[in-house]
Image (spheres, rainbow, N blue to C red):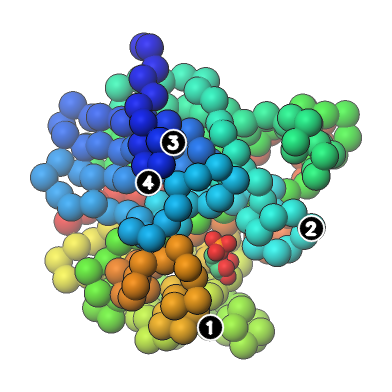
């Protein structure tokens, strides 16, 4: 299939994926960034800030930023690593799926002296969006990295949104620094700034809001991150639309507690699989 990049926001190239039953997704070459996912006849499932820039070397606020090879400021690289601000190339493209590739370059080697190949498959089915991230060590020495699919989900009102599947889940609160906290309820509600790292997180959580149930499954990624900036931090993010915290929640498939180390020639794969159940 010939690939048709079309001009997206800011003139940045994007492509659209279509499933025969009407589901769609959009992916930018910049950061291999998924910015939209709609199931047939339903609303947009991802949050994309109306104030986000679309320009080179700048992260997009919303959709699914790819975090690689560093999480946050857990190292010397730009926050969340360079993958989300570099142009990826197409390795394979079908009507409802695309695989994008990022390899080491003079630019990456200058800041991270490791040969690598990253592949990212985005696949849209009738009610499911599958995101699969693969890293291969193409160098001669071990390679260690963090990663996450930093997914921003759209909600109508954060006060009415809940995460299901949280009973007994242990987490670190990055705001207080407290670790080994345990959530006692099946449901998790949002009442303020939230920035949690969940080691060995459940492989299935569900975003619930009114009648909507969106399953957030993962494999390969051991951890999860749950984030909402709330009022004050939200207002400090210049690329987050006014009161954007009300309409978003990040539930991230993550490899952040322990870095993954690959021997030369070894690969690692992680996925986040999103299914709109109702
Ligand atoms: O994943 C949660 C987090 O690390 C938060 O601490 C917050 O910084 C968020 O990521 C957004 O990071 P960004 O660099 O995209 O502003």
Q: Secondary structure at mark 3?
A: loop
Q: Are discs 1 and 4 less than 8 Å apart at CB?
A: no
Q: CA distance from mark 1 to mark 3?
A: 43 Å
Residue at the spot of label 3: 12
Please determine whether, in this image, residue 94 is positioned above or below residue 123: above
Nearest to N terminus: mark 2 or mark 4 = 4
Q: Residue tagged by mark 4?
A: 35
| Residue 25 seen from this side | yes
Q: Which mark is residue 76?
A: 2
Q: Quadrant of residue 243?
A: bottom left
Q: Which residue is mark 1?
A: 182
**Mark 2 and mark 1: span between their CA atoms?**
31 Å
Q: Percent from the top left, x then y, of residue 216? A: 38, 56
Cα–Cα gap, marks 1 and 4? 33 Å
Report crowding for label 1: few under 14, some 14 to 19, many 20 or more residues within 10 A (C-alpha).
some
Quadrant of the displayed image that contains ligand 1: bottom right
Pick whichever of labels 2 and 3 is earlier in the sequence.
Answer: 3
């Amino acid at each position: 299939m010939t690939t048709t990049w079309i001009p997206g926001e800011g003139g940045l190239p994007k492509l659209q994926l279509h499933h025969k039953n009407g589901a769609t997704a959009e992916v930018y070459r910049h950061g291999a960034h998924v910015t939209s996912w709609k199931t047939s006849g339903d609303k947009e499932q991802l949050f994309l800030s109306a104030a986000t820039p679309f320009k080179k070397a700048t992260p997009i606020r919303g959709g699914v930023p790819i975090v690689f090879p560093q999480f946050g400021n857990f190292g010397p690289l730009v926050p969340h690593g360079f993958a989300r601000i570099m142009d990826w190339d197409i390795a394979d493209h079908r009507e409802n799926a695309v695989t994008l590739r990022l390899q080491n370059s003079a630019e990456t080697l200058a800041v991270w002296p490791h040969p690598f190949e990253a592949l990212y498959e985005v696949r849209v089915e009738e009610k499911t969006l599958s995101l699969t991230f693969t890293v291969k060590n193409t160098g001669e020495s071990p390679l260690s990295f963090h990663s996450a699919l930093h997914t921003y989900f759209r909600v109508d009102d954060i006060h009415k949104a809940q995460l299901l599947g949280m009973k007994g889940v242990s987490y670190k609160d990055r705001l207080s620094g407290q670790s080994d906290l345990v959530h006692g309820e099946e449901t998790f509600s949002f009442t303020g700034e939230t920035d949690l790292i969940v080691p060995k997180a459940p492989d299935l959580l569900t975003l619930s809001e009114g009648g909507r149930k969106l399953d957030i499954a993962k494999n390969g990624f051991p951890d999860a991150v749950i984030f909402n900036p709330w009022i004050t931090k939200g207002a400090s993010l210049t690329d987050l639309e006014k009161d954007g915290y009300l309409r978003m929640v990040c539930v991230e498939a993550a490899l952040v507690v322990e870095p993954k180390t690959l021997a030369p020639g070894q690969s690692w794969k992680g996925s986040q699989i999103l299914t709109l159940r109702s």
